[in-house]
Structure formats: structure tokens, C-alpha cells
Amino acid sequence: MNSGFKLGQDLISPDGQAGTVPLERVHDALKGGFKLKSGSSPAAPGAFQSKPGGTVQNVNIAPAVSDREANVIGTQAALETVGSTMPGGQAVVGAVKGAFKTGLGLASLAAHGAHALGIHTDETDALARGDISPFSEAMSTSTNPEQHLGNFGEEIAEWIGGEEAFKGIALGAKLAKPIEHCCASCF
């Protein structure tokens, strides 16, 4: 195989134009309204395929994409584009997504705390239910192996930071005991 070539799938865009989409982008394209080109599927037109115990779906009709899904897909595509502008950029995007996911988890925890205190707002109610915006969903979901690697690196850094914080708390507690003892006997 010559270098520089990519495998692709012939698809029809939502506006009816034929073209080839790289294999790694076919799923997103189908969600975005692209259709399979005639003769490019091993299934006959109108054929159905199913998984054992799964739902039956006509493989030639792409499922409808909701506005929310379209927003998530668009944001993820933009983040992938940004990550593709430099070497290792996808890993950086993954690390940023990991940090965002941590912040989202902390916000959700705070929302549950606010509910325990009787504080209810639209934002805290949504976070407590797990309802997040399309942007937040895109920012907290890795979409390729490089982003998963960056996310994993962020989680390791976070874990190491947490371990160091616990060591500091433990050391502070050890140092406080002699001071309490000394001060109590001095008075």
C-alpha cells in the first residue's frame, strides 16, 4: 500500500452530493445525516440486520440525529480539529477533557450538597439529575485513542496530586499532636 492513502466509505451527503469519507469518520457522518451510497453496503437495499437480542434496524436508513446529538457531534469535531493542529494535540485535548470531567464531577457533588441543604436552582437540579449540556458532554467524552491517553495521563496526575495532599494532611496532623500536648501542659 502506498503511504498517504486512507481507506474510505462512499456516502451521500445530506444535500445529495456523493463523496468518500475516511473510515474513522463514517460513524459521525452517518449520525450527521449522510446516507450509504447504493451498492456500497453488503446488505441489499431495504435489508435488515440485527444483533442477537438487539433491535432490528434497516441498515440503509440512518437513524435520526437529535439537535442535542448534533451539538455534541459538532463540538467533538471542532475539538478534534483543534487537536489535529499540532503533534500530540489530541493527547492535550484528552487531558483538557479529563480536567473538565473532574470539574464536572465536583460541580455535581456540590449540587448534591446544595440539595442536602435545601438549595434548589435550575442548575443544581440539572447537575443532581446528571443532565449536562451538549458542550459539557462533548468536553467530558474522549473520542479517539490519543484523547483517551491524554485523559488517562490527567487522571494519573490528579491521583498523584491527591496522594501528595493526603501526605500533607497526615504530616500536619502529626505535627499538631506535639503542639497540642505541649500547649496543654504549659497552661
Image (cartoon, grey):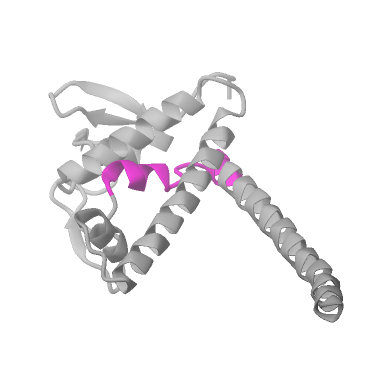
140 lies left or right of 176: left
128 lies left or right of 6: left
Taking the magenta stretch, the answer to whether it contains residue 88 is no
Q: Quadrant of the N terminus?
A: top right
Span highlighted in magenta in the image: 133-149
Which quadrant of the structure image shows residue 72? top left
> From what the image shows, is residue 110 above or below residue 30?
below
Q: Is residue 100 visible?
A: yes
Q: Nearer the viewer, residue 19 or 154?
A: 154
Q: Position of residue 55 (x, y in %)?
A: 21, 66
Q: Quadrant of the C terminus?
A: bottom right
Please tell me which residue is depicted at 44% across the width and 43% down the height of the picture: 143
Q: Nearer the viewer, residue 52 or 166?
A: 166
Q: Is residue 8 visible?
A: no
108 lies left or right of 50: right
Q: Position of residue 178 (x, y in %)?
A: 86, 73
